[in-house]
Amino acid sequence: MTVGTDGFGLISYWDASNGDLKSRTARNAACTAATTTSFDQANFVGDNTSVTVGADGFGLISYRDIANNDLKVAHCSNTACTARPRRRSTGRLPNHAHRPVHHFF
């Protein structure tokens, strides 16, 4: 979990029920309302996720593509992380390897 530049909480998580990477952004200071966004929905992705805020003020999420044993990074396109993110692959991982996103940037 991190706090965005808007002052609201931002989390990333793996939705195990469908194998997707998702984010959830609070819409008020009390976190009683939130917006959920699916980032990657291709065959069991989102395990070992980590989130931070990039230099541009937008969320930056690292995660593992389980099916391809690949480390990926999603960069939110707006503060609420509701717009389609830019994604990139960083390459294959050794089994069970993961690092928090701040280790890559």
Image (cartoon, rainbow, N blue to C red):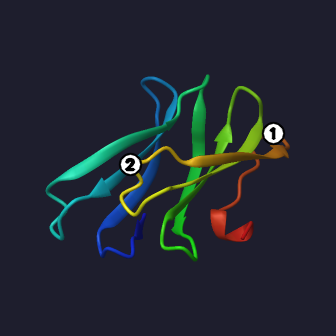
Task: Name the quadrant containing residue 5.
Answer: bottom left
Q: Residue at x 53, y 67 (%)?
A: 52
Q: Residue at x 30, y 76 (%)?
A: 7
Query: Who is closer to the viewer here, 86 or 18?
Result: 86
**Quadrant housing the N terminus:** bottom left
On screen, 20 above or below 61? above
Q: Residues within 10 Å of mark 1 (few under 14, many from 20)?
A: few
Position in image of residue 70 (x %, y %): 77, 39
Real-space Cα separation, disc 2 to disc 1, in angstroms: 31 Å
Mark 2 or mark 1: whose residue is earlier in sequence: 2
Looking at the image, residue 72 sits to the left or right of residue 40; the answer is right
Looking at the image, residue 56 sits to the left or right of residue 98; the answer is left
Position in image of residue 4 (x %, y %): 39, 71
Position in image of residue 88 (x %, y %): 72, 47
Q: Which residue is mark 1?
A: 95
**Mark 2: amino acid:** Thr
Query: Who is closer to the viewer here, 99 or 28?
Result: 28
Q: Which residue is mark 2?
A: 82
The number of numbered badges drawn on the structure is: 2
Looking at the image, residue 50 sits to the left or right of residue 18; the answer is right
Position in image of residue 96 (x %, y %): 75, 43
**Mark 1: amino acid:** Asn
Q: Residue at x 35, y 50 (%)?
A: 24
